[in-house]
Amino acid sequence: MSWPTIPTADARPDLESPYWDEHQETRPPEERREAILEKLTEQVRYAYDNSEFYREFYADVDVDPRNITSFEEFEQLPILRSDDIKQEQKEHPPFGRLLCIDEEDITRIYGTSGTTGRPKVFGIGEDDWERIGEWHAQILWSVGLRPDDRVIITSPFIQYLGSWGALAGVDRLGCTTFPFGAGMEGQTEQAVEWIADLQPDALYGTPSYALYLGETAQESGYDPADDFSFDVMFFSGEPGASVPSTRRQIETMFDCEVIDQGSMAEMTPWMSNSGCEHLKNGMHIWNDIVYTELLDVETETPLDYGAEGVPTYTHLERTSQPMIRYWSGDITRWERHDVTDCDCGRTYPTLPKGIYGRADDMLVIRGKNVFPSQIEDQLHALDDFGDEFRVVVEREGTLDTLRLIVELADGAQTTADEFQDVVRTAIKSEIGVTPDVNVIQQGELERTQFKADRVKDERELAVEI
Ligand SMILES: [Zn+2]
């Protein structure tokens, strides 16, 4: 096997083919595992040979990083965390000793876009960037994009890798690309007019931006379902595209298909988690592009299909700044391909509910794991919900209690008492815990355009006191 693969220049599949590479995408999982192991062996050896960081990081392991011969050996390598990268880059700025190529051979520099703490820096070499474009094109083919499609990208062209990764894939696929961006004053109003004029077939952005765009279009007198011609929207950056009620809202608003995508910036090609044109919800894991394990949130040991845990990613062909066993901190459940049985025929495992939480956000109430996104999904599906809510977790004696403050819509058909029962039943059926419900009128809770802080865990306070 030659490693890494050299990206093809501009070859594309036959227009009638549903696959970019039928053999790769539909082969039996056992056969794929062999190919993955070969790449893992090469990737770990390469990182060890070219990175002082990895040589130190693997100094005490019981396996030979230059010759990993099984998945069991691979699983003995230590887990890499965000803090490890931050510390390394602080001590050896700007890239840390994770960089395996000369700085002068870096083609692109990106970084994390978080507002707190030191950002992480990503140096990407030319070959890596071309492979990223190639893989994103392959995955976008599974989404249904074809070279004659016109695609608008409505996310900020800043250090955020989402926009640039989408652009690389759409360019490589040969679409007509309209890299519009987002975030400037008045830009969304302009986007509405451009979209009305240019009639793009597809949009990339975030789910919350799509909703904002749709509302802005409505305020300008358009009906996005009738006046725009989107066939598909593909999203990353937020879990919303796999939250069923949010997904339905976007699909109805624009009369289009919604595709959920994305792992994390560190792991670009981040489209290695992606829905396809057939999958109703969730994402396939293209694990021969980025190898993905699901690890137990407490014990950090690998989990079988059917379980819930933390996706932990490994680049398979990265020469510039490879990540090996990178702990995402996200929470998801994975499933065998034949359990999902997607009509596309691909044999990748799936995340049937997408990535639905962060390990940090998970509430454990009476022994049950509860994510705020589950509560959000149930409430959004109720007819008389007034759009805002708060979650309060308290402790009475030794018993945890879940209290919800929920708005009742103006003009609701149900009374506050009836709505209280409806909410209680819906939440109990979803999470197995019966909440106390306080119903208030629509508009009483504060709105914010940023990510709302809807959860208060009063139990921690009690412990501190
Ligand atoms: Zn599929």
Image: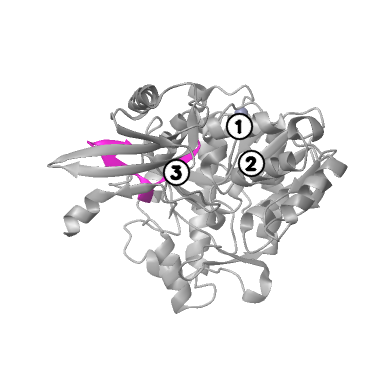
Q: Residue type at mark 1?
A: Gln
Does the residue at mark 2 contact the one at mark 1 (Cβ under 8 Å)?
Answer: yes
The image quadrant in which ligand 1 is located? top right
Secondary structure of residue under mark 3: loop
Residue stretch rendered in magenta on the structure: 353-369
Q: Residue at x 23, y 38 (%)?
A: 401
Find the distance from the CA under tag 3 to the CA under tag 1: 23 Å
Q: Nearer the viewer, mark 3 or mark 1?
A: 3
In the displayed structure, 11 sits above or below 431; it is below
Residue 176 % position (x, y): 84, 46
Please give the residue where the numbered disc 2 appears in the rendered image.
211
Q: Nearer the viewer, residue 423 or 312?
A: 423
Please give the residue where the numbered disc 3 appears in the rendered image.
444
Q: Earlier in the sequence, mark 3 or mark 1?
A: 1
Q: Residue type at mark 2?
A: Leu
Q: Residue at x 59, y 45 (%)?
A: 208
Q: Nearer the viewer, residue 65 or 206?
A: 206
Q: Residue at x 69, y 38 (%)?
A: 233
Secondary structure of residue under mark 1: helix
Q: With 65 as the anchor, is 29 left or right in this view? A: right
The numbered mark at residue 249 is 1
Whether 342 is among the magenta residues is no
Whether 363 is among the magenta residues is yes
Residue 103 % position (x, y): 62, 75
Find the distance from the CA under tag 2 to the CA under tag 1: 8 Å
Q: Nearer the viewer, mark 2 or mark 3?
A: 3
